[in-house]
Image (cartoon, rainbow, N blue to C red):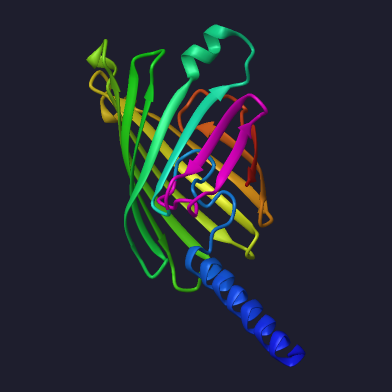
């Protein structure tokens, strides 16, 4: 009887370990995989996962994954005053529409800011090369102003992530915004660079950004700190 219970226990434990390993292998997800420094990636958190992140302890973001392919989020500033909350409170959703071999992903995202009549839509593509060292991310998006269409804009981004190890990476982005009143030469462009450290549940970034235009004086990088906790 004791031997039978021992064998049954070993079988059950082994099955649970295999299922846990299968889930880990299938998602291969770590905190921050759903985004770079600023732009989103095409990754989605595993079903039931939640995260809380903050930029400079001012801009806060909460996300929840409804399914393995659908993620929702809320973004706002730290509650300093009601006007700031109203102007920044943003609802978002990301839907992963295609993936292959847990290495190649395409998603679509949309967001809405009720306080400023702004909304947006974007498409993300993420490509993890075979050696698992380099990721290339592309984001093509549109920003809509329902009260003033001249403010409608294209929001584009190209990002790379080079993984020194499983939990340490370099990230770089080039982002641009242009609308109907701006030609290509007058579009707003800026870059970000940073280092990301993370464990299985915590992520921390030390980064900086700067405009890609003349007239920035001696500015090298403006500091940007971000932290994230995965639940």
Q: Which residues are magenta?
A: 41-67
- Residue at image coords 30%, 34%: 121
Say which of 34 and 226 sits in front. 34
Against 8, is 186 above or below? above
- Left or right of 175 on screen, residue 167: right
Q: Can residue 222 be seen in the rendering of this structure? A: no
**Residue at coordinates 49% horizontally, 48% vertically from top-left?**
34
* Quadrant in which the N terminus is drawn: bottom right
Magenta residue check for 27: no
Q: Nearer the viewer, residue 85 or 50?
A: 50
* Camera-nearest residue between 137 and 90: 90
Residue 194 at x, y percent in the picture = 61, 45
The residue lying toward the viewer, choosing from 103 and 153, is: 103
Q: Residue, x 63% and y 84% (percent of image)?
A: 11
| Left or right: 67, with 198 as reference point | left
Judge whether 84 appears above or below 208 on screen. above
Does the magenta run of residues contain 49?
yes
Residue 78, percent from left and from top: 63, 20
**Image spot of residue 110 (x, y percent):** 34, 34
Q: Is residue 216 above or below residue 49?
A: above
Q: Where's residue 164, x and y in %?
A: 63, 63
Residue at the front extreme, as displayed:
1
Image position of 173 (left or right of 54) = left
Visible residue check, residue 30: yes
């Amino acid at each position: 009887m004791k031997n039978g219970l021992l064998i049954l226990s070993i079988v059950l434990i082994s099955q649970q370990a295999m299922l846990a390993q299968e889930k880990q292998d299938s998602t291969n997800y770590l905190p921050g995989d759903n985004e770079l420094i600023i732009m989103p990636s095409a990754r989605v958190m595993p079903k039931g996962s939640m995260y809380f992140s903050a930029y400079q302890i001012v801009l806060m973001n909460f996300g929840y994954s409804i399914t393995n392919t659908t993620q929702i989020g809320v973004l706002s500033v730290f509650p300093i005053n009601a006007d700031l909350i109203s102007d920044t409170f943003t609802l978002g959703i990301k839907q992963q529409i295609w993936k292959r071999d847990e290495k190649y992903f395409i998603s679509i995202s949309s967001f809405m800011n009720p306080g400023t009549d702004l909304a947006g839509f974007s498409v993300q593509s993420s490509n993890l090369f075979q050696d698992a060292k380099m990721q290339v991310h592309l984001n093509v998006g549109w920003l809509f102003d329902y009260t003033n269409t001249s403010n409608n804009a294209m929001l584009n981004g190209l990002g790379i992530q080079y993984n020194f190890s499983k939990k340490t990476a370099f990230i770089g982005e080039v982002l641009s915004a242009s609308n109907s009143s701006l030609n290509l030469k007058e579009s707003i462009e800026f870059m970000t660079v940073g280092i990301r450290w993370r464990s299985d549940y915590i992520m921390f970034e030390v980064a900086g950004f700067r405009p890609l235009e003349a007239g920035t004086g001696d500015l090298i990088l403006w500091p940007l700190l971000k932290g994230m906790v995965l639940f």
